[in-house]
Amino acid sequence: MPSLRPAIRRSAFTLVELLVVMAIIGLLISILLPAVQAAREAARRLQCASNLKQLQLAIMNYESGLGILPAAGIVDIANYQFKCRSGTMFSWAALILPYIEQGTLHERFDFGVSVLEQRGDPQAAQPSLMLCPTDGALGRLFVDPELTAGRSFGKGNYAAYCSTYHVDLQETPPLQWPFAFPGAIVNHGKRLNEITDGLSNTVVLSEVRTRDRQDDQRGAWALPWTGASLLAIDRHSFGASDFTPDDFGKGMSQTPNCQGPIFDML
């Protein structure tokens, strides 16, 4: 005689219940994901600001050790070419490498020759402190066959602030060095007592965005024109040495150009 045992019922989700659970999970993800992304971006921005602060501290440590601020760029006047992307020597960033725990990279540079003639390509490195994670500059390089002869330059996200830009191209006789930058660490390394506007009112460094193009020099930290093409300006000549942004006409003798080393075509 067969035994009578109660049937065992196995519980399971119905299709409707499964769809409801999936909908709830999807809703939670849609709510939480933007918050997570915003938190990550906030953390990246904090890292960028921290890098900027550490670089500024390194500049002050440089000044404490040498009694002078680093020059924004050491340009070889004898070989200087007045055209876009025309730096030939070293930037402020290369000078402060020992102060940002990059002494080994600093030793790889031969400061007796041009930055374009370095053995082992130390200029292609990308020190972590020079990178703002928000921009994604890691892995981006600047390569210009005309300027760099095929050498690669690592990009970063910090550049010296040069303040207003003045150029005298039509002086008689021509000036050997026609550029004038009144910024804190440009033209030459200044002493702190030369900054008469007050140190707390003086901008030294700024963030710059890079582009994922090898022919764009922005961020090439080892070159003097680290922020090259950061500025886009219409320049026209009204007189012997007067360049003013304005519209066309009025007897202007020059059209928009990119002759200056920190200018980009509009």
Image (spheres, rainbow, N blue to C red):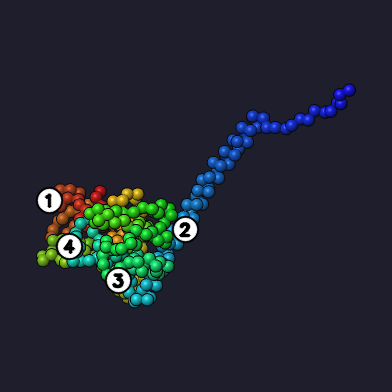
Residue 133: image x %, image y %?
Answer: 43, 54
**231 left or right of 11?**
left
Relative to the observer, which residue lies in front, 204 or 241? 204
**Residue that carries the numbered disc 1 in the rendered image:** 251
Disc 2 from disc 4: Cα separation: 41 Å
Q: Quarter of the image holding residue 185?
A: bottom left
- Residue under the point 34% across and 50% down: 211
Disc 4 from disc 3: Cα separation: 22 Å
Residue 120: image x %, image y %?
Answer: 33, 62
Q: Nearer the viewer, mark 2 or mark 1?
A: 2
Amino acid of disc 4:
Asp
- Residue under the point 35% across and 56% down: 155
Choose the circle earlier in sequence order: 2 or 4.
Answer: 2
Which disc is residue 46 wearing? 2
Choose the circle earlier in sequence order: 3 or 2.
Answer: 2
Choose the circle earlier in sequence order: 4 or 3.
Answer: 4
Secondary structure type for disc 4: loop
Secondary structure type for disc 1: loop
Q: Nearer the viewer, mark 2 or mark 4?
A: 2
Q: Residues within 10 Å of mark 4 (few under 14, many from 20)?
A: some
The answer to whether any part of residue 67 appears in the image is: yes
Q: Residues within 10 Å of mark 3 (few under 14, many from 20)?
A: some
Residue 162: image x %, image y %?
Answer: 29, 63
Amino acid of disc 1:
Gly
Q: Quarter of the image holding residue 241?
A: bottom left
Disc 3 from disc 2: Cα separation: 29 Å
- Residue under the point 26% across and 57% down: 148
**Residue that carries the numbered disc 3 in the rendered image:** 189
Choose the circle earlier in sequence order: 1 or 3.
Answer: 3
**Residue that carries the numbered disc 4 in the rendered image:** 168
Residue 118: image x %, image y %?
Answer: 29, 63
